[in-house]
Amino acid sequence: MFADLLKRLTAAEPDPLPDTDARLALTALLVRLAKSDGDYDSAEISRIDRILSARYALNPVEAAQLRAEAERLEREAPDTVRFTRAIKDAVAYDQREAVIEALWEVVLADGVRDEEEDALIRMVAPLLGVSDPESAMARQRVEARQK
C-alpha cells in the first residue's frame, strides 16, 4: 500500500490522488512537521487527531488509525521537498491552503513556535504553492481560533 502511494507521489507527473491516499499523504506531512523539532509530543499527536476528526469527519479511533498509518508513511517518504512537491501536484489548491492552516495548528499545539517547525513551514508553504503572506494569514486565523 505505502509503496504504491509513494510511487504515485513521486511520479514525474502525478495524477490527482484518490481521497483516501490524499488524506494519508497530507496526514504524513502533519506528522513530519510535528516531528521536525525532535519532540513529537502528546499535544501535537492530539492536535493531529482533532484536525483529522474535524477535516474528515472521523471518530477518535479512526483518526488515530489514520495518523498511525501516516506515521509509517512519513518514515518511508522521500525527502520533504520531493514529498511536498508531489502533494502540490496531486492536491487541489483550495485543499493546500487548508493544509497550511492545519500545519500551523500542529506548530502551535504545544504553545511553542519552534525554529525547526517554523523553518519547515517556510519551506513547505511555497512548495505547496502558498505564498508567505498567505501562510502568515493562515497562522493568524489559527491563532485567532485558539484565543
Image: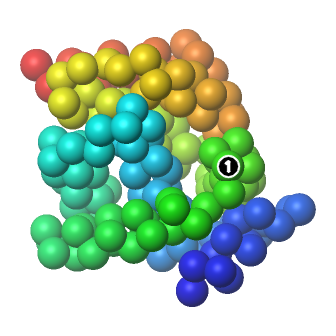
Please state if 128 lies on the left or on the right of 48 as rendered.
Answer: right
Residue 38 spot, x, y in % from top left = 37, 37
Name the residue at the front extreme: 38
Residue 12 spot, x, y in % from top left = 89, 62
Residue that appears at 22% across and 57% down: 49
Name the residue at the bottom extreme: 1
Please state if 110 lies on the left or on the right of 18 as rendered.
Answer: left
Residue that appears at 21% across and 44% down: 41
Residue 88 spot, x, y in % from top left = 68, 48
Residue 129 spot, x, y in % from top left = 68, 34
Q: Secondary structure at mark 1?
A: loop
* Residue 83 seen: yes
Residue that appears at 40% across and 51% down: 31
Residue that appears at 65% across and 80% down: 3
* Residue 88 seen: no
Please state if 45 lies on the left or on the right of 131 as rendered.
Answer: left
Q: Quadrant of residue 104?
A: top left
Name the residue at the right extreme: 12
Task: Tell me the quadrant of the picture where the C terminus can be found.
Answer: top left
Q: Amino acid at mark 1?
A: Asp
Q: Which residue is mark 1?
A: 79
Task: Tell me the quadrant of the picture where the N terminus can be found.
Answer: bottom right
* Disc 1 crowd, CA 10 A, few/some/many (<14, 14-19, 20+): few
Image height of 72 relative to 136, above or below: below
